[in-house]
Image (cartoon, rainbow, N blue to C red):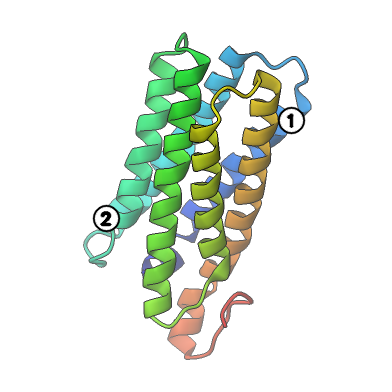
Amino acid sequence: MDELLGHAWWMLALRGAAGVLFSLLALLWPGLTLLLLVAMFAAYALVGGIASVVAAIQNRSTRTDWWVPLLLGLCSVAAGAIAMLLPGITALLLIAVMGANAVVTGVFDLITAVRLRKRGRNEPLLFFIGILSVVFGIVVLLYPGAGALALVWMISTYALITGALLLVFAMGARGWQRADSSGKPNSPLHS
């Protein structure tokens, strides 16, 4: 798994950048409507999902665990497609789609973190991202009646934090391939 992420570090960086961009647009746009939030979420989920799918497919011939980022990507693409194709859905359904997407992607991030740990890489950032995503998704699913403004702030904060953490994690994963070839740890996140 660490080799796959080392080769596809750009996928993590793209997911992180999409999250940061989505959150900044949502936080800095005070008159944000629910319909615009749906469109922004769809773009965010599609970009991150497509990046994960492409990275998985590019590495399927060399990695047996390529299916983990593939499933993560397909989940995000599905969530983005639902939001794009059904923009008039109710806020409650939108909240459920966003919450479910966060739980599923968080679980796959946790699976990846556990697999990395089994291979000798202790990556607490990815584990934290997974926990944060699962907790966020559960809170969203348990309390769907929150006001639209609270929802925008909550989603934006979640996307900003996980996006920033994914960018940091991607930079660490970028150095794994060089470190593996030299035999020395090259990641500031490697413990």
> Which corner quadrant of the image does residue 22 belong to?
top right
Identify residue type, mark 2. Trp
Identify residue type, mark 1. Leu
Q: Is residue 88 left or right of residue 148?
A: left
Residue 67, numbered circle? 2
Q: Residue at x 54, y 73 (%)?
A: 175
Residue 51 appears in the picture as rendered: no
Could you classify mark 1 by the number of other residues whose Cα lies within 10 Å: few (under 14), some (14-19), or many (20 or more)? some
Could you classify mark 2 by the number of other residues whose Cα lies within 10 Å: few (under 14), some (14-19), or many (20 or more)? some
Badge nearest the viewer, 1 or 2: 1
SS at mark 2 in the image:
helix
Query: Would you say the residues marked 1 and 2 are in contact, meaning their CB atoms lie under 8 Å apart?
Result: no
Q: Give the CA distance from mark 1 to mark 2.
A: 34 Å
Task: Name the residue that disc number 1 marks.
Answer: 27
Q: Position of residue 18 (x, y in %)?
A: 58, 40
Quarter of the image with the N terminus in it = bottom left
Q: Residue at x 56, y 52 (%)?
A: 132
Q: Position of residue 48 (x, y in %)?
A: 47, 42
Q: Residue at x 50, y 82 (%)?
A: 179
Residue 101 appears in the picture as rendered: yes
Quarter of the image with the C terminus in it = bottom right
Q: Is residue 104 left or right of residue 163?
A: left
> For the view shown, which residue lies furthest in the top direction?
88
Q: Position of residue 120 (x, y in %)?
A: 43, 83
Q: Is residue 95 left or right of residue 111?
A: right
Q: Position of residue 75 (x, y in %)?
A: 35, 39
Q: Residue at x 43, y 19 (%)?
A: 84
SS at mark 1 in the image:
helix
Count of numbered circles on the image: 2
Nearest to N terminus: mark 1 or mark 2? 1
In this rendering, the answer to whether 130 lies above or below 183 is: above
Residue 156, numbered circle? none
